[in-house]
Image: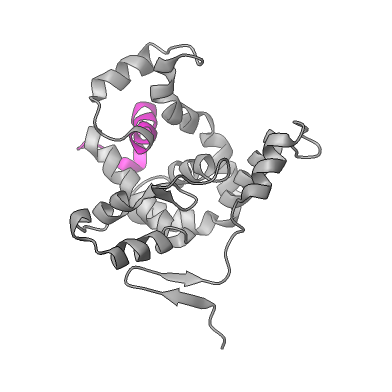
Amino acid sequence: MKSDLTIKNSYCTIPQTKFRKWDEMDVLLWKLGKNDSRRRSGVYYLNAYKDAYVQYNRDKIIKHAYAAGIRPELLGGVAWIESGGMPENKTSFGSMGIQIRTAAITLGLDPSELTTRNQLELATCLMEDDFTFQIAATHLRDLALFDYPSSATLYMTNEQYIMAGIRYNRGVERDLGFFIYLINNLPARDTDDYKFISYGMRLLEIREHIKKLINE
């Protein structure tokens, strides 16, 4: 039987069959195309890609979400937000936009002790969906417990759900109370204050849509 594994390193294996990556041509079709829902052009082109990405990977999303103790729609929502759009920045890798440092800590490694080879291998693995879903799911679980240590991460309240997304996007430096105030006193969408919580609010907004994508 022919194997589809093409790369294997210290952290993962990279299968040959995978979902098509978003590239510069996609960016042009998204940015330059007229917004048309029937032709799926413009922003509809981007959203169609996001939907297809989540649907293609739904089995992986469900598997790794439950393994980490979180709801599949939370992991799927992050996947939907992070996939497509602008090309990844220089410090984040893969469709989930995860940094090497974050991946290392999630795996129980000391980032300061990673060799150049270790970093290259981790970066390669973060381009592979199965590995990056595993890391993202565990990271989301850890972020949820950061603010709510005694919570049942499979059964988050709306506030906890929003905060998991905010922490994924903003990190853990700011105090929980800062974000809770903004959530309870919702700023206008076009303000700088709203940007602090926009990622988590978006996750909550698309939750039912993600459930449908995963369960179809």
196 over 145 or under it: above or below: above
Q: Considering depth in this image, is 58 or 52 the residue closer to the camera?
A: 52
Give the percent coordinates (x, y) of residue 154. Answer: 35, 43
Q: Considering depth in this image, is 85 or 107 the residue closer to the camera?
A: 85
Residue 156 highlighted magenta (yes or no): yes
Total numbered labels placed on residues in the image? 0
Whether residue 184 sits left or right of residue 173 in the image: it is right
* Residue 94 appearing in the image: yes
Give the percent coordinates (x, y) of residue 73. Answer: 48, 43
10 over 134 or under it: above or below: below
Residue 158 highlighted magenta (yes or no): yes
Which of the colour schemes (rainbow, by chain, secondary structure, one colour) is used? one colour
Quarter placement of the N terminus: bottom right
Q: Considering depth in this image, is 75 or 117 the residue closer to the camera?
A: 117
Residue at point 54% right, 45% down?
87
* Residue 152 appearing in the image: no
Magenta range is 148-168
112 over 202 or under it: above or below: below
Give the percent coordinates (x, y) of residue 13. Answer: 42, 72
Whether residue 91 sits left or right of residue 29 in the image: it is left
| Outermost residue toward the right in this view | 38
Residue at point 20% right, 37% down?
149
Prevailing SS of the magenta stretch = helix
Residue at point 48% right, 59% down?
129
Residue at point 64% right, 46% down?
49
Whether residue 198 sits left or right of residue 111 in the image: it is right
* Snapshot quadrant of residue 38: top right
26 over 209 or under it: above or below: below
Give the percent coordinates (x, y) of residue 84. Answer: 58, 45
Whether residue 71 sits left or right of residue 23 in the image: it is left
